[in-house]
Image (cartoon, rainbow, N blue to C red):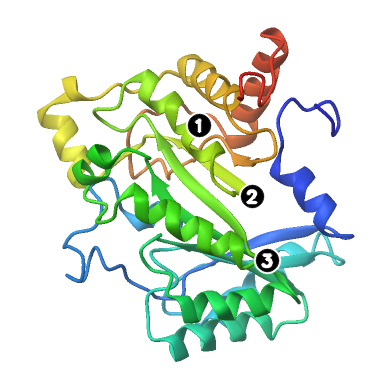
Amino acid sequence: MEDKGKRYNGFGDFLQKVFPFKVQKIAVNAGFTCPNRDGTKGWGGCTYCNNQTFSPAYCHTQKTVGEQLEEGIRFFSYKYPQMKYLAYFQAYTNTYDELGSLLKKYEEALSFPEIAGLIIGTRPDCMPDELLDYFAALAKKKFVLIEYGLESTLDKTLARINRGHTYAQSEDTIRRTARKGIYAGAHLILGLPGESRNEILQHAGALSALPLTTVKLHQLQLIRQTRMAKEFAQHPERFHLYTVDEYIDLIIDFIERLNPSVVVERFVSQSPKELLVAPDWGLKNHVFTAKAEKRLIERNTWQGRLFI
């Protein structure tokens, strides 16, 4: 593979091609909820979900979008004064509100001259055409990446974890997004209960057939005060929690089957220790990534080696 000898298509390399300057994501909690929590699609959310797991210290719902960005920019600009930023609307479903309210929050972020674009985390069943039209117009002027939480390509799994949408909806929304000229990303959890190793690897083939820009992978983590953690306590035999080495080989087998044009945004996620039930690997994300890169070299393989 190209780019500094990397054997996979990394997100940092992708951003270097898109931007002539350094960029940094700043996570924003814009106070949205989710149709799977308020009764529109269901109650209680997905069985694995506790959104405290991805809220940086500077990101609190009581603060406006602008206040959160100001704090984030202040934090990073001390060390990198020339840095530009991507406002990352991360927590819950960031396209789930009245159109006017949504646009007001996006425009509040875009009013900062340091903000070079938006990354929007959402569900594939929460992207109406009128909002997609807004993002399509914005993408002609700014960087726009819509990250869709797919979590699995299997409907049996989506039903089991109470996602409230089908994989067909995921496919349709990703295709609609790409047709509008907008970068589309997919988020996947590897190791969900009931999925065999072979089924997990088949996700790579399914995603490779879609017009995706990025894929974000992470290991199944059991989080306190979630229904999945309770299920694990009662029926641990239903789960296979990967060791670090097992998971490294799993993701390498996965990206071998993945279209080499798809950008791999990350391999793992790191939940706060106080919320994590298992598996507790005790590894920072960059340490895990270094181990994975070393294993790719040991196996003399690369992203897309088995892609058809």
The amino acid beneath tag 1 is Ala
Q: Residue at x 48, y 82 (%)?
A: 130
Does residue 80 show up?
yes
SS class, disc 3: strand
Which label sits on residue 296?
A: none
Q: Is residue 152 left or right of residue 116?
A: left
Which residue position holds label 1?
Answer: 204
Q: CA distance from mark 3 to mark 1?
A: 27 Å
Callout 3 crowding tier (Cα within 10 Å): few <14, some 14–19, many ≥20: many
Q: Residue at x 67, y 26 (%)?
A: 303
For the residues bearing labels 2 and 3, Cβ distance under 8 angstroms: no
Q: Earlier in the sequence, mark 1 or mark 2?
A: 1
Where the C terminus falls, by quadrant? top right
Which label sits on residue 213?
A: 2
Which residue position holds label 3?
Answer: 86
Callout 2 crowding tier (Cα within 10 Å): few <14, some 14–19, many ≥20: many
Q: Residue at x 40, y 48 (%)?
A: 150
Q: CA distance from mark 2 to mark 3?
A: 16 Å
Q: Is residue 261 above or below residue 6?
A: below
Q: Earlier in the sequence, mark 2 or mark 3?
A: 3
The amino acid beneath tag 2 is Thr
